[in-house]
Image (cartoon, helix red, strand yellow):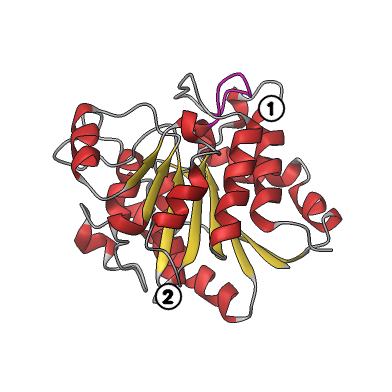
Amino acid sequence: MNIQLLLVPYDSGHRGWRCGAGPEHLLRAGLQGHLERLGHVVTAIQVLEDDADHKPAEIRTAFELARRLAQAVRAARAVGHFPLVLSGNCNAAIGALGGISPVRCATFWFDAHGDINTPETTTTGFLDGMGLATAMGLCWRDLAATVPGFHPVPPETTFLLGARDLDPAEADWLGQSSVTAVPVEAIPGGLPPLLERAGIAGTVGYLHLDVDVLDPAVGRANYLPVPNGLSQDQLTRAIGAIRDRVPLAAATVSSYSPEEDHDQGICRAAFAAIEAMVGSGT
């Protein structure tokens, strides 16, 4: 497989801060060599940057980076390369999804959190807690519409996997929605029948991995750890079940803060998850 690495090294509008340090840390830890040993070809490594003459601004920066990412994902796919996005924040998904369209897409969102708050429901004001909500068209519609190719993903082809820290408004919305929520205890064994019943025939997959879906026993992914998460084996087997059902058009690994990962357990698990996403190139 020809793989293009697309790095979005920002957290809350700040380059290289907190989870914004994660993408380049994964590269320094040897991700390119790992992929090449699997038999893949890393065709390019592209770091997406915000305009240097702008001061950091979470909302403006996030959507500008999404616009640039959408173009990069589309360009990679146009030449048959697999776009693997390494991002500080989950809202990079808006750009990745824009680059996949207009192909019908099933979205697989691994995250300890729901990311389905809106400006009306958030108690923190954290834009990244609205990433999946934005992807589904629940908020930030006008700004999301400026991302080339972006169209909201339908809830009925959206899977939220491993979430266990939901705000009350998120839980209420999720309970009334057609999103398929898959709890930790149903992963991976309960996933194949859910995939079989879902209306995802003829779709391509977008796989979004916020590494805090992993249990803190694997490692501390970032500054928002949540207990009772997935093991590395659960995660990789779940990714395998998804790939058995739909071809992946793009994938994102996000929200990794290296300064929290003292023994590099999350780094190793991220490599294993990426390996599950792309398979063996030999």
Residue 188 drawn at (x, y percent): 55, 39
Q: Main secondary structure of the magenta part?
A: loop
Q: CA distance from mark 2 to mark 1?
A: 35 Å
Q: Amino acid at mark 2?
A: Val
**Magenta run includes residue 4:** no
Image side of residue 68 versus residue 271, left or right: left
Residue at 47% of width from left, 72% of height from top? Answer: 71
Q: Quadrant of the N terminus?
A: bottom right
SS at badge 1: helix
Tell me the quarter of the image containing the C terminus: bottom right
Which residue is denoted by mark 1 in the rendering? Answer: 265
Badge 1, how many Cα within 10 Å: few under 14, some, many 20+? some
- C-beta proximity under 8 Å, tags 2 and 1: no
Residue drawn at x 13%, y 40% as measured from the top left:
120
Q: Which residues are magenta?
A: 214-221
Residue at image position (24%, 57%) is: 137
Q: Which residue is mark 2?
A: 103
Tell me what residue is drawn at x 36 percent, y 53 percent. Answer: 158
Rendering coords of residue 172 (x, y %): 18, 34
Q: Quadrant of residue 144?
A: bottom left
One can see residue 53 in this view: no
